[in-house]
Amino acid sequence: MPQLNVKGLDRSEWGNSIVRLHQSHRSGIGRYGVARIINSADRSRSCDAVLLGHDDENTIYMAFDTRQALGIDKGQRLSFELTELGWLGKLRWYLKTPDPRIYIPAWLAVWSVVLGLLGFLLGVVALLK
């Protein structure tokens, strides 16, 4: 369990559901991987986020909402665990993330698949009659 200094994201990344973390602390999770971050000091606090990199091995960068979910403030040290989410966890994250740039296209994609399947089923029923 690494213990790293907590800093905020750059102003251009505010509101994003990302965490910037050096590759050596990502537990083999690739760039743009979606993972659950668990605060080791308070295991009831966790959040899901996209992992990106940076060069500082002693620091983890995260947005305000992520810090709130983990119960940590800028300037503190965070001891944490990472768990990569499977495809179902990623789908849940895409649909439930508070970032409208992510959840709106995700919901549009889900509804497109549902309507496509419905159209396919109606087509099959029509051919069988």
Image: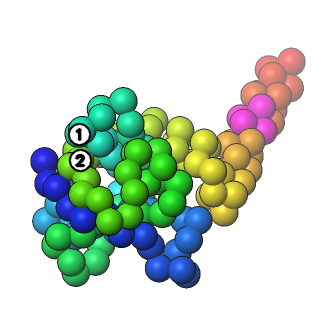
**For residue 16, side relative to residue 57 (left or right):** right
**Going by the image, does 120 lie left or right of 20?**
right
Residue 90 screen position, x and y as percent = 46, 44
SS for dot 2: strand
Residue 81 at x, y percent in the picture: 22, 44
Amino acid of disc 1? Ser
Residue at mark 1 to residue at mark 2: CA–CA distance: 5 Å
Q: Quick one: label 1 or label 2, which is nearer the N terminus?
A: 1
Q: Amino acid at mark 2?
A: Phe
Q: Are marks 1 and 2 in contact (CB under 8 Å)?
A: yes
Q: Which residue is mark 2?
A: 80
Quadrant of the image occupied by residue 14: bottom right
Neighbour class for label 2 at 10 Å: few (<14), some, many (≥20)?
A: many
State left or right for residue 127 relative to residue 26.
right
Q: Which residue range is magenta in the image?
A: 114-118
x 38%, y 36%: residue: 45
